[in-house]
Structures are given as structure tokens and as C-alpha cells.
Image (cartoon, rainbow, N blue to C red):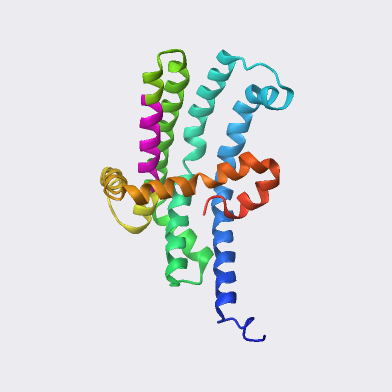
């Protein structure tokens, strides 16, 4: 029985890794707070009555709210770039069992990739906002346009999954990082599909369990 709780036992090593992943997730979530508050500030008044009171959606007001949420979100989300880069850098260390100084390693990577991570995050958020706005603007047009926007959005999302992992591991220009992300998304397409499904799990969990899932998402949502 004592061997189970030995620090070098498989169980304790697994629990230690899980705790490390949770801590990395919390660190990253801290940098997401500005974006979360900004989105709630602009989208809350438009969506709140619809979600909680059953009111009818004011389409023009909602579209205006999305536009302002996107504009200010570009700035508020920028800090997430270096944070997500640091998260992927540390997670790779955890998987390889290479580093036990989680917080120190996280902020070292955060500092080293600060400028480049911010620029890439701004690019990602700007493109995402344009696609979202296009979808709502083209909502009343024929189905082929909507499906084209959905397909393009899904593909660009798949490409975006590689941006910060690549940035965390390789020294490259922003253009080269984006190009390599595109190539990885295409050349490793089965893996890309799997990554897309896994990244969508937090949304599915929140959809089915609502606020009950928040503690789990806080601890594991990003990582």
C-alpha cells in the first residue's frame, strides 16, 4: 500500500502531472480574463435577455455588439498569444518529463515569445472576427455562401491550432510560422481533425452541463 503513495509510483507521477497541467491552465486563464470581461461587456446586453428571458433577438443590435466586441477584442486578446505559446511550451516539457519548474519555465517562454505571440494572436483574432461578421452579414443570402464561410472558418481554425505550438518550439518569422501551420494542418490532416475534436470538448461539456462545468473548465479548459 505504501508503494502506491510513493512519490515515484506511477499513480503519484500521474497525479503530479495532472496538477501541473491544471496549474498551467490556471496561469493561461488569468491572461484570458481581459478578453472574457470585454466579451461579456459588449455581448452580454445583446444575448442576456435572449438566453435568460426568452426575448427575441434584435439582429441589428446584436450585429453591432459583435462588431464592437471584435474591435476591442483584438486588443484584449493580444496577451493570450504569448500565454498560449508558453502553455504549449510547458505542456511539452511535462509530457517529456523534462522540467519541474513549471511557473518559472512558463514565464520564461512568455517573455521570450511576447512580441511575436501578441502579433500572431492579433492576426488570428482579426481574421476570426471578419469571418464571424461575414457569416452574420451573409446570413440572409443563399446557402452556398453560408456554407463557404463555415468551411473556410473551420479550415482556418484548424490551421490556428498549430500556430502557438510551432511558435513555442521553433524560432521563425511570423510569416514562416503561419506557413508552417498551414502545411501541418494539411499534411497531418487526420491529426488535425483529432485536435479539432479535442479542442471542442470544453464547449460540448459547457453546453450539456452549463455552469456546473465551470470548475472543470477553469482547471482543464485551455490545457
Please count the marks in the image: 0
Residue sitting nearer the eye, 47 or 213: 213
User: Which of the 4 quarters of the picture holds residue 51?
Assistant: top right
Whether residue 110 is visible? no
Question: Can you say which quadrant of the picture contains the N terminus?
Answer: bottom right
74 relative to 205 in the view: left or right: left
The picture places residue 184, in percent across and down from the top left corner, at: 29, 49
Compared with 122, 25 (above or below) is below
The picture places residue 199, in percent across and down from the top left corner, at: 48, 47
Residue sitting nearer the eye, 140 or 17: 140
Give me the residue at 42% from left, 63% from top.
Answer: 92
The magenta region covers 148-161
Compared with 161, 110 (above or below) is below
User: Which of the 4 quarters of the picture holds residue 210?
Assistant: top right
Compared with 190, 150 (above or below) is above
Q: Is residue 157 magenta?
A: yes
Amino acid at each position: 500500500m505504501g508503494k502506491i503513495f510513493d512519490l515515484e509510483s506511477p499513480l503519484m507521477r500521474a497525479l503530479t502531472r495532472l496538477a501541473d497541467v491544471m496549474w498551467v491552465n490556471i496561469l493561461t486563464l488569468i491572461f484570458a480574463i481581459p478578453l472574457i470581461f470585454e466579451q461579456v461587456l459588449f455581448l452580454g446586453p445583446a444575448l442576456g435577455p435572449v438566453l435568460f428571458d426568452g426575448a427575441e433577438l434584435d439582429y441589428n443590435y446584436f450585429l453591432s455588439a459583435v462588431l464592437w466586441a471584435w474591435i476591442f477584442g483584438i486588443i484584449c486578446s493580444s496577451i493570450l498569444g504569448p500565454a498560449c505559446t508558453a502553455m504549449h511550451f510547458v505542456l511539452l516539457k511535462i509530457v517529456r518529463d523534462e522540467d519541474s519548474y513549471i511557473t518559472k519555465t512558463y514565464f520564461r517562454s512568455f517573455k521570450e515569445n511576447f512580441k511575436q505571440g501578441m502579433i500572431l494572436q492579433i492576426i488570428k483574432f482579426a481574421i476570426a472576427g471578419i469571418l464571424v461578421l461575414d457569416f452574420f452579414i451573409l446570413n440572409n443570402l443563399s446557402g452556398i455562401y453560408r456554407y463557404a464561410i463555415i468551411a473556410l472558418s473551420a479550415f482556418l481554425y484548424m490551421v490556428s491550432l498549430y500556430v502557438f505550438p510551432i511558435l513555442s518550439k521553433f524560432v521563425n518569422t511570423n510569416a514562416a510560422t503561419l506557413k508552417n501551420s498551414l502545411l501541418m494542418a494539411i499534411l497531418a490532416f487526420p491529426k488535425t481533425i483529432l485536435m479539432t475534436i479535442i479542442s471542442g470538448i470544453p464547449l460540448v461539456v459547457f453546453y450539456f452541463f452549463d455552469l456546473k462545468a465551470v470548475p472543470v473548465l477553469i482547471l482543464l479548459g485551455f490545457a
